[in-house]
Amino acid sequence: MNKFWLYVTTVFILLAIGSGCKKKVPINQIQTVQPSLQSFEFIPKDNTGNLSDSVICTIQNDTITGFYPLNTDVTELAARFSTNEQGVDVTVDNISQDNGVTPNDFSRPVTYTLVTSDNDLSQTYVVILKKFTGLPIVYINTNNQSINSKDVGVSGTFIIDSNDVRFSSYSGDAAFYLHGNTTASYPKRPYKVKLSSKASLLGMPSGKKWILLANYVDKTLLRNYLALRISQMFGMFYTPRSRFVELVLNGTYVGNYQLIEQINIDKNRLNIKEMDDDDISGKSSTGGYLIEADNKDEDNDHMRFTTSLEKNSFIIHDPSDSIAQQTAYIASYFDSTENALYASNFTDSVNGYRKYLSPASFAEYFWVNELTKNNDAGFWTSTYLYKDRNSLLNMGPVWDFDIAIGNTDDNNNGNAEGWWIRNQAWFSRLFQDSSFTEVTIAEWQSIRDSLNSLNNTIDSMTDYLHQSEVENFKKWDTMNQSFAPLGATEIAGSYDGEITYMKDWLSERITWIDDNLQTLYQ
């Protein structure tokens, strides 16, 4: 019996001790959660008269971004938002925000502050609204006069809304012209812009002449941009700078364009000697000249000449109004260059072709156009050369790549394999000289590793143009259109598909060149 009561007592004591070890938690204790925004948007019913379409914003970390339609007043917009917890106080500049009611000026970044009801935790967000696609917007107004001529300009105003705090906006008078050869016949037309005076546009150095490239047959919109990046990688003396913009012509949106420097002799562009009318003899007549191959014979606005030996046709861009003695000098120089290049002693280091042209610049030009298999290059059209005063003839700057990088079936240039520029005028002869071939191969090898970054460049620009390409192809429904034979037969059917095709083609092209470098030797 005593043992029984001892057992009961022991159990009771152990239970009492166990229950005394339990931690008591106040039933009214609540864990505080970091406040956050779950959604952020602007809808027309909250902004009557100010907003035609809803603007759904994206929230990434502490930044909120939205794109609003053209011709929208954003100086008094009310935002609609949701938070992760009830009772969160939302303010802007210490002013409490009523959901869908309180207006703010979103023409500038606006900071929203969220604070929990016990003032224990807070979170801030910066709201940035960008006009339309976020790209700079170019407005051309000609009072509805059509721009139909490459020769006769149409007067009007040229306005740039930079849409970006990094760049200044611009407004001024200008004359407008059609630009290009084949591209001028497409419904989305390229334009030349001649400002009334030199100006810096979107952070690019000051200049008077600019081009708006339409990139109509290039469904990636990126081939010209990418080729110019490759030109920079190869260290060419001058590569035109550019910016992507949206173009509004006489009040109508006409698509994504590439605003690019027109190639001309200028201290901010092709920085060689500018000639005067009295530079007609001696050393003064030796440069500088900007020449373009024009074997299509489509340019009648400039002085032209044809070489005696190979019958290659060229036009003189600068000096733009070259007089007889200047034309005679440069035409004679090109004749001497061809005569030396095709002579039996052409490899002679003193009296051969090196007396007249720079092998290094020809090698750089070769690779930019060979890597991209640029159908327009190779002394046909859009092929530039320049000669500074008392200097050798150089190739470049490079230009016009909308039907490059696999975007054509012409001349089998949609095939990532095979040489193209290697077999064109002058180059086919240059590669018969082993020393030129060595220089060219060394140029490739010096830049080869850098080419691995091209996919990153494409990905970055694809992200940058995302909103713009959507609007552009709403305007121009060309995704399922073939531009063959000048353009590519293959149709990807989507923007992402076009980007993938271009990246795959470029990868195959680089691999093929790596594997066939030695075949450049004759």
Image (cartoon, helix red, strand yellow):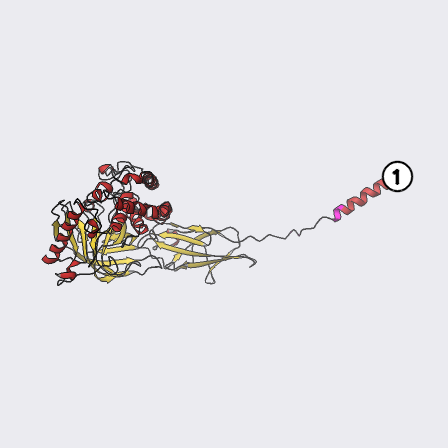
Q: Give the quadrant of the C terminus.
A: top left
At x 42%, y 56%, the residue is 127
Numbered-mark total? 1
| Residue 482 at x, y percent in the picture | 25, 37
Choose between 67 and 472: the one closer to the eye: 472
Badge 1 amino acid: Lys
Q: Is residue 82 visible?
A: yes
Determine whether, in the image, residue 234 is placed left or right of residue 263: right
Q: From what the image shows, is residue 504 above or below residue 224?
A: above
| Residue 93 at x, y percent in the picture | 45, 63
Residue 477, located in which quarter of the rendered image?
Answer: top left
The stretch of residues the image draws in magenta is: 18-33
| Residue 362 at x, y percent in the picture | 24, 49
Determine whether, in the image, residue 497 is placed left or right of residue 195: right
Choose between 206 and 189: the one closer to the eye: 206
Residue 153, located in which quarter of the rendered image?
Answer: bottom left
Choose between 350 and 244: the one closer to the eye: 350
Q: Give the quadrant of the N terminus.
A: top right
Q: From what the image shows, is residue 499 above or below residue 248?
A: above
| Residue 3 at x, y percent in the picture | 88, 39
Residue corresponding to mark 1? 3
Q: Secondary structure at mark 1?
A: helix
**Magenta region's main secondary structure?**
loop
- Graded by Cα atoms within 10 Å as few (under 14), some (14 to 19) or many (20 or more), the crowding at tag 1 reads few
